[in-house]
Image (cartoon, rainbow, N blue to C red):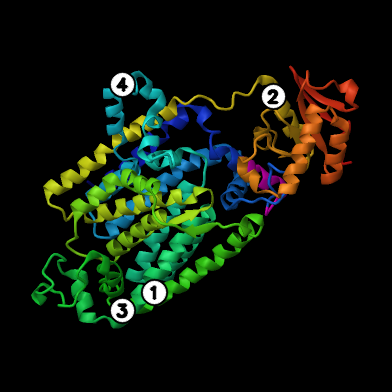
Amino acid sequence: MTQRRLYLLVGGCVVAVALPLAANPSLHLRADAMSNTALAHAVRRHGLPPPDPYLAGQPLQYHWGYNAAIAGLSALTGIEPLPLMVWLGPAALAVALAAGARLVRRAGGSNQGAALAVALALVGLNGWGWLILATRWATGATAPAETPDEGVRSFLPQLVAGYDVRLGFFATKALVATSFTWCLALVAVAAGALLRFLREGGWRQGVVFALAASGAGCATAHVGAGLFGLAVVGLGATLWLRRRGDPAAAEGLATSPGRCSHKRPACGQREDAPRSASETLAATAARAAPSERTAGSRGELFRRAAQALGFVGVGLALFIPYLFVVSGTSVGRERLLWLALPDGPHLLGIAAGLGPLAACVAIAGRPTRWTLERAWLAFLAAGFAAAFLVVRAVDGVEEKFPFVAAMLLAFYVGSVAGELKPRRRRLAWLLAASAVPTTLLGLVAYTRAPDTIRLSAAEAAAFEWIARNAPPDAVVVARERSTLVPILARRDLYVPDRVGFHRAARCDPAVWDRRTEQMRRLFEEGEAAAVLDAIAAELRRPVLLVVRAHEMRVDDIGLYQHFSAGDIRVLGLDSELRKP
């Protein structure tokens, strides 16, 4: 396979995954797209840091780095935030796969190995759930005719023991308007830059690592923190082991066959060379020979590892202030991270999700050569997998770690695939193909997913009127479809209609109780004018009320009717929508 065909494969995979977005536009505003769209509009209205658009006037207790970047890009291009986020998802997947293919080739892999890495990174986490589906067909638990609509939902809850069904469907991460696919892409770029710096030097690679790692943290804070932590541990081990190493042995370790006996120095290894892959992970990074371009002195790799720690510090200097700002509110005072023993759901999640990849790693066995890149890929993948098992994070954020581990494991397998015997290499490709049915089931069901918005024409007209005519700082009080107000009306909402949406339960409990009581008085006791007066006095901002015609009569409550469509009314205190 030529390099051109390799990148054509990357492009073809991305296009195939993105087809549901083109076939079903109702997928665009689903799941994380709702909160991310609301936050991007809030950044454009209020600047940085934005307040919470779902709780007007309250601090935003959520990470907004991705949304700020989207808001800036939207201002530059004139494209609305939602389509930008939707189509940047497949673009991020393309970056991740292309960066991985490049990393595989730099690690000594062939173009065929890079192609295998691309395939495994795309479908490797999807596991063998289709076997469970086949069993359910055989027992009559699921009808085959229901499969195109149910897709992975019919078996994934059993596969991951109810923990999180998304663990079994990697491809959907690129189909939701979310920051996580960009986080994966930036992790791949950061890993490649760090390893190239260690191998060849060059301050540009160090800067790329610092920027990409801090960007990954701004996209998904826990993953960024994990990347920095593992980089510090790995580089620290490099420095420590390099000081204890023998440069002659280092050259032998980097160039000699790894399957030679440790008791045979003629094979190019010392008798006290590392005797297992786990020992070799850090030792290889510490003692790998310099490349031909930069064959250097005994302390060359030691010096580069020390310099790399400096670039880690630069990345942390960019990341920590952002982390402090987004975690400095009440959410920062709760426990964001803690350790726990591995439990059943997490163990099953790893076993089911990483099954094909783990099998491929077992097939690969110990590589012929432990290179710097292979050791680091294995180390980072093992680190993220271990973190998933023993770390618990607020809102179950640790569920993102297996995705990172899967991507890095795929790159590792691709880097060693060229050294496998033909039979083993074919078996690795067969394992990759075995995860394709799960992916296709998920993509088909995703394409056929119904529209979850189902907004009436009158509601859409009311939100559009608010977006066009209300002051930017106006606050909307609504009960019908209120979660769509920050997205479609592009204004802050007084209080959502559901506790828990967009971390609403983490606001000040006194504020939440007072606002829900105001909503009860407004809709159940009919004290609309008094309640809106109190809200306007509390927030010192224009207030609009969205109601259905049968709920309130304008003549009875002393409010101005600003807009009506069908049975939907937009009411307010001021006929000119001025601040009170």
- Residue 368 in view, yes or no: yes
Q: Give the residue at x 71% y 48%.
A: 509
From this view, report whether residue 33 is shown above or below residue 136.
Answer: below
> Which residues fall within the magenta stretch?
38-49
Is 242 contained in the magenta span?
Answer: no
- Considering the numbered disc 1 on the image, is that residue within a helix, a strand or a loop? helix
Q: Disc 1 vs disc 4: Cβ atoms closer than 8 Å?
A: no
Query: Which marked residue is nearer to the observer: mark 1 or mark 4?
Result: 4
From this view, report whether residue 261 is shown above or below residue 507.
Answer: below
Rate crowding at label 3 as few (under 14), some (14 to 19) or many (20 or more) other CA atoms within 10 Å. Answer: many
Q: Quick one: label 3 or label 1, which is nearer the N terminus? A: 1
Horizontally, is 577 left or right of 547 in the view? right
Q: Quick one: label 1 or label 2, which is nearer the N terminus? A: 1
- Disc 3 from disc 1: Cα separation: 10 Å
Q: Amino acid at mark 4?
A: Gly
- Disc 1 from disc 4: Cα separation: 56 Å
Identify residue for label 4: 140
Q: Give the residue at x 89% y 26%.
A: 557
Expressed as whole percent of the image width and height from the top left, the position of residue 113 reads: 24, 50
Identify residue for label 1: 236
- Disc 3 from disc 4: Cα separation: 60 Å
Identify residue for label 2: 459
Q: Quick one: label 1 or label 4, which is nearer the N terminus? A: 4
Main secondary structure of the magenta stretch:
helix
- Residue 79 in view, yes or no: no
- Considering the numbered disc 4 on the image, is that residue within a helix, a strand or a loop? loop
Identify residue for label 3: 242
Q: Amino acid at mark 2?
A: Glu
- Disc 1 from disc 2: Cα separation: 58 Å
Q: Disc 1 vs disc 2: Cβ atoms closer than 8 Å?
A: no
